[in-house]
């Protein structure tokens, strides 16, 4: 049963990640990323981390990807034409590199599997429970926790400042076009999208 | 293992049966209550008191022609109503609807998914409601829909924060994410809305914003953006959005009454067995009904918030209030009062 | 039972796919999505090892990685907005002020 669930969601994760990487439209790529995140969340639950699975959906799929979609829609990004989107020449380097990486890792694990690697350790109640996680978080990892809080604060301030209009620029009076984003003068798409 | 599966499916069937009927009933309640508040009769032609109006509406939805905009992004356009239904019909699986039932020697908790992550799963699944709004707005190839979609996503993710923090405050004295433990805590102490009244009000306001209900319904504002993100949807696709909105309201109401008003329990009533289960379910439905009536009442009483007022309220008022509530509840828990 | 190496292989595969995406896409947002994919692959590896060693450390590091990914996404997208405002494009081939 567990093997069955793993195989389904692993296949789903790989398929949707291929769509993320290869699809021309940024919106489709983002929605495929959601499917990938879901599959990884299910795998987290299989591995005995249900809280991380829920957090994955809450943070990644529910907030970060929504932010991506928001920016894509705000910037009104259109689908790129297929051959113009790929950086010429990069693919010839990246693809063999990736294949060599996967091949090496695969070889290591294939050997380990054939030689009888230790099976998955059984789940302990402590590993799955939130109490164990929280106890470790707030005792051994308290300093990283506080630093991450500070990091998030800094990120919020940085993002607000970076995305702000220049204080003296008013829409319609400077060298920039009148409407910054979802354009007032844009024509709707004439041909059907597919 | 398979008995557990059967029990889970039966429990889901019960909850599904409750939540699928929310939309038709609310359709009638909304229109009659709106008419009453506005001092006019409301639908009274179709059946006594207009009680068969939802049937007439359902027939209309099924028979109407579904118009698809020519330049719409077909896949996303058709996906958006389906995505709207997904969080609506998966979030209620962690709401308990009765005390533990003992059947044939085994104790079955009356929750569809009695997992440790409880409330966190609810919040995670309900945060996915943004996608249908955003995709509907984007795929319709319509400026008003796009604006409605952008506003909806910004509104939803802003008020999610206040909602999550007010829920978090409830969890502090209980030490558990499970809703069954929260109900047990409220049975042992007083209903949560009394000591945590600030958190309750933050939750109430944030839940209006999360479900796109007036006074926060600018994303689908009828007089401002035509119909906002669902302008280009007709017939059954609109019915899907409609159903999803009411079911979302009911699921969030179920969470709210479980967190703040004792859920399926009544003070002083401790029945067990099948009678206890039925009384628990009926109590939960009654409380959800009262909550939905409040939703309708507020809708037809208050004017709509302007978008910048809405964002200001979410970030500058509700978020600090919910953090204040969290600190207060933490202090009270430490002091031993809760 | 699924051996741990299967999870690790899957994570390596996702990481490789993400790397190819990050190196070959021209659209800045698509590069960002591929980076998120790589982060997820790393998270999967960490949780798999956490399970194998029976320790909470891996899960905690994933917790921090998620928070850092959120911060990075927010700042990165804000930078994209700022760049778009002045250059009207986020095609990384054209965001090039260097001479050679």
Image: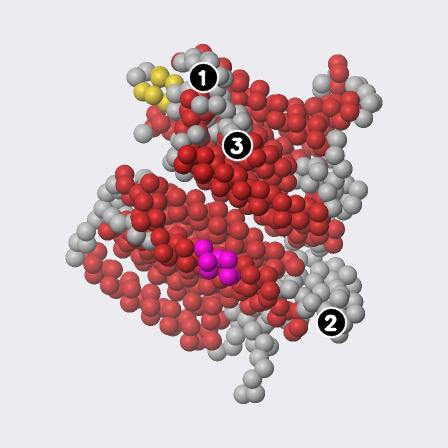
Residue B207 relative to residue B109: left or right = right
Counting other residues with Cα less than 10 Å from the Cα at mark 2, is it few (<14), some (14-19), or many (20 or more)? some
Q: Position of residue C29 (x, y in %)?
A: 55, 64
Where residue B292 appears, x then y in whole percent?
Answer: 63, 27
Are the residues at dot 1 and dot 2 in contact (C-beta closer than 8 Å)?
A: no
How many angstroms separate mark 3 from mark 1 (CA)? Answer: 28 Å
The label nearer to you, 3 versus 1, is 3
Q: Nearer the viewer, residue A106 or A165?
A: A165
**Residue at 58% across / 25% down in the picture?**
B288
Magenta region, mostly helix, strand or loop?
helix
Mark 2 secondary-structure assignment: loop
Q: Which residue is labeled 1 in the image?
A: B277
Does the magenta segment cover residue A97? no
The residue indicated by pointer 2 is A176
Which residues are the magenta region? A149-155
Q: Is residue B26 left or right of residue B190?
A: right
Q: Please indicate, yes or no, whether residue A190 appears anywhere in the rendered image.
A: no
């Amino acid at each position: 049963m567990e093997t069955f669930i793993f195989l389904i969601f692993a296949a789903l994760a790989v398929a949707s990640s291929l769509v993320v990487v290869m699809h021309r439209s940024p919106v489709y790529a983002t929605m495929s990323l959601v499917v990938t995140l879901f599959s990884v969340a299910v795998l987290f639950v299989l591995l005995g981390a249900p809280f991380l699975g829920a957090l994955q959906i809450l943070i990644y799929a529910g907030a970060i990807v929504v932010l991506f979609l928001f920016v894509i829609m705000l910037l009104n990004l259109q689908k790129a034409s297929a051959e113009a989107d790929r950086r010429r020449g990069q693919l010839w380097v990246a693809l063999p590199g990736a294949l060599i990486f996967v091949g090496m890792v695969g070889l290591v694990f294939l050997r380990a599997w054939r030689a009888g690697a230790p099976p998955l350790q059984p789940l302990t109640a402590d590993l799955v429970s939130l109490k164990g996680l929280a106890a470790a978080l707030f005792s051994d990892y308290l300093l990283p926790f506080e630093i991450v809080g500070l990091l998030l604060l800094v990120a919020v301030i940085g993002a607000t400042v970076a995305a702000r209009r220049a204080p003296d620029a008013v829409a319609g009076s400077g060298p920039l076009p009148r409407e910054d984003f979802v354009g007032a003068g844009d024509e709707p798409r004439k041909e059907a999208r597919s | 293992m398979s008995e557990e599966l059967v029990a889970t499916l039966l429990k889901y069937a019960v909850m599904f049966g409750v939540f699928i009927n929310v939309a038709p009933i609310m359709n009638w309640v909304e229109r009659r209550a709106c008419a009453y508040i506005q001092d006019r009769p409301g639908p009274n032609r179709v059946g006594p008191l207009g009680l068969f109006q939802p049937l007439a509406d359902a027939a209309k939805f099924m028979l109407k022609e579904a118009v698809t905009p020519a330049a719409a992004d077909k896949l996303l356009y058709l996906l958006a109503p389906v995505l709207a239904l997904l969080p609506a019909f998966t979030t209620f699986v962690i709401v308990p609807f009765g005390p533990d039932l003992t059947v044939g020697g085994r104790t079955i908790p009356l929750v569809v998914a009695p997992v440790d992550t409880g409330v966190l799963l609810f919040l995670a699944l309900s945060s996915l409601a943004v996608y249908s709004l955003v995709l509907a707005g984007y795929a319709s190839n319509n400026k008003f829909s796009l604006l409605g979609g952008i506003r909806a996503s910004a509104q939803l993710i802003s008020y999610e924060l206040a909602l999550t923090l007010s829920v978090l405050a409830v969890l502090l004295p209980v030490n558990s994410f499970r809703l069954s433990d929260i109900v047990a805590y409220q049975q042992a102490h007083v209903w949560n809305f009394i000591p945590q009244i600030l958190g309750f009000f933050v939750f109430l306001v944030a839940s209006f914003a999360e479900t796109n209900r007036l006074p926060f319904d600018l994303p689908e504002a009828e007089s401002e953006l035509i119909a906002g993100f669902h302008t280009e949807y007709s017939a059954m696709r609109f019915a899907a959005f409609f159903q999803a909105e009411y079911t979302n309201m009911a699921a969030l109401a179920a969470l709210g009454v479980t967190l703040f008003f004792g859920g399926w329990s009544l003070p002083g009533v401790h029945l067990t067995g099948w009678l206890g289960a039925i009384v628990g379910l009926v109590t939960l439905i009654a409380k959800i009904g009262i909550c939905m009536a409040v939703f309708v009442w507020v809708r037809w009483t208050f004017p709509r918030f302007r978008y910048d007022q809405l964002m200001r309220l979410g970030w500058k008022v509700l978020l600090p209030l919910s953090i204040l509530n969290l600190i207060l509840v933490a202090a009270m828990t430490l002091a031993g009062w809760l | 039972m699924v051996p741990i190496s299967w999870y690790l292989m899957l994570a390596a595969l996702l990481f490789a796919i993400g790397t190819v995406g990050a190196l070959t896409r021209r659209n800045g947002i698509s590069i960002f999505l591929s980076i998120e994919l790589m982060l997820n692959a790393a998270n999967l590896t960490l949780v798999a090892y956490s399970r194998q060693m029976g320790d909470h450390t891996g899960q905690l590091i994933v917790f921090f990685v998620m928070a850092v990914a959120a911060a990075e996404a927010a700042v990165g997208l804000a930078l994209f907005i700022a760049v778009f405002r002045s250059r009207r494009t986020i095609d990384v081939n054209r965001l090039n002020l260097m001479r050679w």
